[in-house]
Image (cartoon, rainbow, N blue to C red):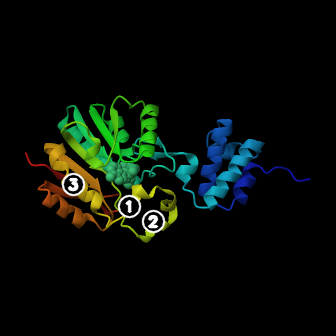
Amino acid sequence: MSSSPSLRLLLSDCVLPANEARILLAHVLEKHYQLPRSALLSRDDMVLNEAASTDWEALVSRRTNGDPIAYLLGKKGFHNIELLVAPGVLIPRPETELLVDIALGEIAKLNQPTLILDLGTGSGAIALAIASAAPLATVIATDQSPEALGIARQNAQLLDLHNQVEFAQGSWYEALDNRSLFDVIVSNPPYIANLDPHLTQGDLRFEPLSALTDYASGLSCLEAIIAGVDQCLKPGGLIAVEHGFDQSEAVVQLMQVAHLIDIQVHLDLAGHSRVVSGRKSL
Ligand SMILES: C[S@@+](CC[C@H](N)C(=O)[O-])C[C@H]1O[C@@H](n2cnc3c(N)ncnc32)[C@H](O)[C@@H]1O
């Protein structure tokens, strides 16, 4: 007579790498039994009920097919917050936390209520992480994608930041309906060149193409964002943009052309140039 497998057996027999199998099984235990991750060890002889078992098998099958873990869990940690994520938005990346830290450094220096603009907010990651860490900041977050804005708005509600973060739809600065001048503008725009082979590999295959590529050289969104700062940044204000590993020189040049000063290249934790910042002169 065949008996249903215990958690221990589900893990040892799983085709996925051990760390991924543990993450997904912990998710099933939390969802169906409200049990913490530690139950993987403390209750390792437990047997899943039918609904949980069906869920586990579907998750393993989707992960085997390449679905990103964050989409399977429906959430992703970023900076000091947790965000809902779904296939309509980019999965926030750890390296993007650098943009948040640069903005927070500027907000701390200003030490007064500040107005921040996050262009291409996706899940709301940058805007909401800034708002969560800086209660004196008001953030306007824009995106062209209504689907992304829907998820970003849900995240703002769940994090109780909806009074501090306002969302607007449209292409870059066109989303703004008034003539506010911002203390800080941040953006992680699509910067992968059209036909870059990375677009057909790994997690990227499952993320919205319009969040990843500008369908051109990779620089056209960065160019539009940097060219537009003059109209929207306060004198002395700061802009910081994320870019691809080989784009920092080109982005510095775009900032020089836009007459920005105090241009700086910032490295991520892996030591790659990841962000360029510049300031509007006084
Ligand atoms: C690389 S994703 C970044 C998402 C989020 N800020 C993050 O860091 O996780 C780029 C975002 O820019 C948005 N986007 C693309 N083209 C745009 C445009 N012309 N105007 C405004 N947003 C745009 C995409 O929908 C996507 O959400």
Mark before the other along the chain sequence, 3 or 2: 2
Q: Is residue 111 above or below residue 60?
A: above
Q: Is residue 71 above or below residue 191?
A: above
- Disc 2 crowd rating (10 Å Cα; few below 14, some 14-19, many 20+) is some
Q: Which residue is mark 2?
A: 199
For the point 65% across and 52% down, the residue is 59
Mark before the other along the chain sequence, 2 or 1: 2
The type of residue carrying mark 2 is Leu
Residue 197 tag number: none
The type of residue carrying mark 1 is Thr
Q: SS for tag 2?
A: helix
Q: CA distance from mark 3 to mark 2?
A: 24 Å
Percent across and percent down for residue 209 are 44, 58
Percent across and percent down for residue 274 are 30, 59
Q: CA distance from mark 1 to mark 3?
A: 17 Å
Q: CA distance from mark 2 to mark 1?
A: 8 Å
Is mark 2 in CB contact (under 8 Å) with mark 1?
yes
Ligand 1 within 8 Å of disc 3? The answer is no
Residue 213 tag number: 1
Residue 226 tag number: 3
- Disc 3 crowd rating (10 Å Cα; few below 14, some 14-19, many 20+) is many
Image-quadrant location for residue 12: bottom right
For the point 79% across and 51% down, the residue is 5
In this rendering, position of residue 184 left or right of residue 145 = left
Q: Which residue, as the protein is rendered here, is positioned at the far left?
A: 282
Q: Nearer the viewer, residue 215 or 163?
A: 215
Q: SS for tag 1?
A: loop
